[in-house]
Amino acid sequence: MDLTMFMQQMINGFSLGSMYALIAIGYTMVYGVLRLINFAHGDIMMVGGFLGYFGIAVLGLPFGAAVILAIVGSALLGMASDRIAYRPLRSAPKISLLITAIGVSFFLENAFNVFFGGVPRAFPVPAYLEEVVNFMGLMMPVSAIIVPIITAFLLAVILWVLFKTKYGMAIRALAFDVGTVNLMGIDANRIITLVFGIGSALAAVGGIFWAVNYPSVEPMMGVLVGLKAFAAAVVGGIGSVGGAVLGGLIIGFTEVVVIAFFPELGGYKDAFAFIFLILILLFKPTGILGIDFEKSRF
Amino acid sequence: MKKLALLATSVALLASSSFAKEISVGVTMSMSGPLAAYGQTAYEGIEFANALQPKLKNGDTIKLVLIDTKGDKVESANAATRLISSDKVVGIIGELTSTNTAQVMAIAEKKQIPVISPVATNDKLTEQKEFANRVCFTDSFQGAVVANYATKDLKLKTAVVVVDQAQVYSLGLAKAFVDAFTKAGGKVVKEIKVSSGDKDFKAVVSQIKAANPDMLFLPMYHPEVSMIARQAKQIGLVKPMFSGDGVANQTFIDLGGDAVEGYMFTDFFDYAAPPTQRSKDFIAAYAQKTGKQEVNSFVALGADAYNVMLDAMNRCANPEDSICINKEIKATANFEGVSGVINMDKTGNSTRSAVIKVVQNGKAVYKATVNP
Amino acid sequence: MNTLMLKKEQWLKISFVAITVWFIWFSNSHFDEYTIRILNNIAIFIILAVSYNLINGVTGQFSLEPNGFVAIGAYVAALLLTSPEAKQYQYAIVDPYPFVLTLHANFVVALLLGGAFAATLAACLSFPVFRVRGDYLAIVTLGFGFIIKILAINVPEVTNGSLGINDIPEFSNLYWTGGIAMIAVIVVLNIINSKFGRAMKAVRDDEDAAIAMGVNTFKAKTLAFCTSAFFEGVGGGLLAALLTSISPDLFDFFFTFQLLIIIVLGGLGSTTGAIIGTVLVMGGSEWMRFLDEPMNLLGYETTAMPGMRMVVFSLGLILIMLFAREGVMGKRELTDLLKWRRKGGK
């Protein structure tokens, strides 16, 4: 393999890893405050992609406006799902919450299947994103290069919110202990809703990136991606935003690079995320960035 | 005297039409689930053909009994059993995929009920079975069509084949192509495996570019093929690309955009060049009912599955005799179907032509017909 | 101990067994093929549901394992039951490994081996997962199911890839499926009523307290998980022998989701509930076909919306969780209901 191809795969790896990272952040934040694996999170990514498609193809909006529509719509959907399906079960045994999450996930997938059909729709990618850049023999579409850059920017924003704002402090406090937060006069429910909103917004961005890089949207597109993103969050350290990004990058890179070097393993691509998950649970259950959630902090 | 004769004739007519009954023909199809779009399209054809021609020669009406298999194997088994034991159908049309169709055929075989599959192309489907039939061509035929066209007409010598491990269709067609291509003097320099559901094929197209073949053969379904085509264009891989009928629909062209300009694939028929009179009539009636000029191959094949069944029933003295129907299906010769001229043989396979189409300006355009 | 009540319970158990045996005999001779097929399905799903209930409902560990273990049981049984000639003929992708061709066993051994294989894998999975707080069980088992499917597709020398294994001899009939269902229910009930069962319930109700009381929670969870896996493997083998052909796409997440709905509807933790849930869902599934067709809603004619059935299922699950979390039976069994009546209201 020559240098050009190697560089190409590195950028691909970064791209894919960033998309997993964006979705993993949402998982890890919700788990941090609620100890809930929100199975429906991957489907929020799908909804984001569909809203973007809807905005451009049906409403005729320019790309930027469609992205905003997707982000706002998904955030609202995430917050609504918390309000309707999860909040009433705050005091219920955990298993009920998990089952409900699966129910919401399944509902989203099938509702979109019924109303939009299972056939993939072509996502109208704006021309400037599809342009292929030729840099020293390296041929990459603009879309693949933009993804890691924007992800890094968003990560910086999230970390700033978490560590430099009052709301962020409330979120971190919530991850620590729900009861105390309420005692301190902060409405825990509102903070939780905010967490869902932020997580879903990021998932929507991930969904748009996905739709731009692999221009099709279909109701099941979030399923496997969501699972891998959760595995990424666990691998990096559940409860830690940095860990989620790290986990996402690791899994994304592995998928791209291993296939590049060992093409015969192509069929096993999807298994890597879960193999990493099992390995991490065997050797360092708290994840690479090692946040023990008994004394959790983001 | 005249009055008596008139009375007698009308009584006789009334009596004969009151003897006209409803005969049930079962349809097992994936109307929901992951393959819903394909299943619904095929059923559209069956239903429409039934609407155009619901009656047998002797006045009996054919009633379609549809059971949705949800694309699931267990449901396919249930559906077949229910149709045969509860609804007492004399024949079954369906299913969609080769694996589910195999399930239906296994059950029908034990009960000696003929099955006609509209679109399942896997070679092994009709082997070692008496009551299995199909109106589409087989994978080996399709593979040979592409291989021969590529070597003889386009003079291409080397090829890379990308196989979707998770789809029976892909495995069968790839194998058929490799055999035929090698036999025709070509060389398959590389076989790459992928799995359906994948979207990222950048590693795959890089490998192909490095191997530098004369052509690419992608015997898969449109979601994966369109992604490969796009990503190939992105790294500057420009070579003749071929697929089978798995991409023969508009969604493929929509998903692929201008990355699939010049893409070639095989299909069953071309609505712009109707091969038979029945075809012309069907297309016209279809356009009138749905307002759509384009008739998807699945619609045409669904219609033909019904038409062949109807034709066989007409040639039986007792149209409810399943064994006779099966015999007559296999004896169908030079049948002018909607999708072309169909000849059935005693193994239950149909001999028919294929067309090759190419994507030009966002539309699938007819290029050539290949006769068996 | 009220001797009269004890006797009543024994009578109940004997009559349960007797009625089931009679029902199986009756159905086999009197019902048509379609009904028999549905009854076979129900029996197999009862086996799967009562064992799935053991880990999810009784031990309170949320797991999504059924599709993986059922797949294992099905493939093991298929490989052992199909004749070498049939295998030689079908393996069209690549040639099978020689040991695949020689594998052969009779029905009972095939089922037991399928179950044993599944249980062994479950034990391997338990180790990394139950060491940590069982939160991750769901994701790991979900991923496990995916990996099994990936293996089934990518190792065609053993599994014949996506072509699957066909021409499996049809050993399953109501005697086998019904009989094994009965055995499964009896075994599971015995486990639940034993000291292991009490440990499992303790884990469910309050794991910290259980550990404080000296309960070996790791052992309890692992036992529940492996027993679950064993019966799911056996059920998989029965399924393979009923369908006579299996392929990787049969064992997808929806399979697990169906079982989840069944045990939730019946009542998490109740074996009777699992049985009731199976009958309701499998029967209801057929009944709900009308949802996929054009409907007349208050005089407004809707078009056919295939897949609406799934939407209704998932909505139903959410609503049950929100408003009727106990399901039909809650944690109670049939015997508890009778006790309650006798004591005159508790």
Image (tube, coloured by chain):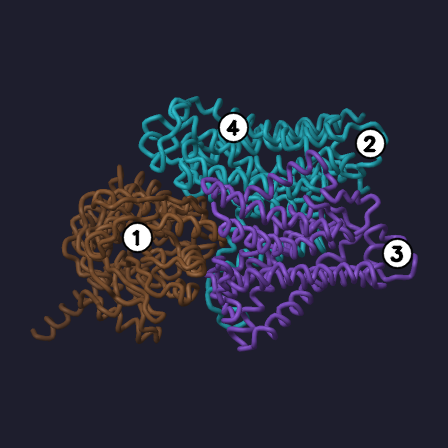
Chain colours: A purple, B brown, C cyan
Q: Is residue C276 left or right of residue C296?
A: right
Callout 4: helix, strand or loop? helix
Q: Position of residue C311 (x, y in %)?
A: 57, 58
To which chain does the residue with label 4 belong? C
Which residue is situated farthest in the right direction here?
Answer: A184
Q: Looking at the picture, which amino acid does disc 4 mark? A: Gly
Which residue is situated farthest in the left direction here?
Answer: B1
Residue B105 sits above or below residue B68 on the image: above
Q: Looking at the picture, which amino acid does disc 2 mark? A: Ile
Residue depicted at x 61% and y 70% = A67
What residue would you read off at disc 2?
Answer: C211
Q: How much space separates mark 2 and mark 4, taking CA atoms?
A: 33 Å
Q: How much space separates mark 2 and mark 1, taking CA atoms?
A: 68 Å
Q: Position of residue B344 (x, y in %)?
A: 19, 50
Judged by depth in the image, the label closer to the viewer, 3 or 4, is: 3
Judged by depth in the image, the label closer to the viewer, 3 or 2, is: 3
Judged by depth in the image, the label closer to the viewer, 1 or 3, is: 1
To which chain does the residue with label 1 belong? B
